[in-house]
Amino acid sequence: MAEVIVLNGRLSEEEKNAYLKRAKELYPGKELERLEINVDGDYVDLTYHFKGQPFERIRRITGYLVGTLDRFNDAKRAEEHDRVKHDERK
């Protein structure tokens, strides 16, 4: 069960559970780690914190979409090695 943090007020367990249920409906397939509820009079601000999703980096190398080079033969590995690398973080 996700951690629920209430700021600037108090909420009943029933209200907290209703907000958790709504988060599951809005974001199916994501695992909620923490829900922050900021009470502002009659309104609340909800901040969802989800657990990280593992992913595999996919690159287009020599015309193929690949995650790793383990299935490339020596010629394709050499071709990838000789490519000009561009740093996108400049």
Image (tube, rainbow, N blue to C red):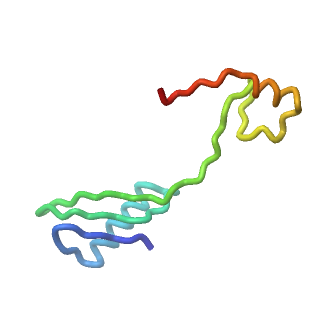
Left or right: residue 15 compared with residue 84 = left
Q: Position of residue 2 (x, y in %)?
A: 42, 70
Above/below status of 25 relative to 77 = below
Residue sitting farthest toward the left: 41
* Nearer the observer, 21 or 33: 33
Q: Position of residue 52 (x, y in %)?
A: 51, 56
Quarter occupied by residue 8: bottom left
Left or right: residue 88 compared with residue 41 = right
Q: Residue at x 14, y 61 (%)?
A: 40
- Quadrant where the image shows the N terminus: bottom left
Q: Residue at x 74, y 40 (%)?
A: 68
Q: Residue at x 66, y 33 (%)?
A: 59
Quarter occupied by residue 32: bottom left
Q: Residue at x 87, y 26 (%)?
A: 75
Left or right: residue 76 compared with residue 25 = right
Q: Position of residue 65 (x, y in %)?
A: 71, 32
Residue sitting farthest toward the right: 74
Q: How many numbered dots are placed on residues in this image?
A: 0
Left or right: residue 4 compared with residue 25 = left
Above/below status of 3 relative to 65 = below
Quarter occupied by residue 4: bottom left
Q: Position of residue 26 (x, y in %)?
A: 40, 55
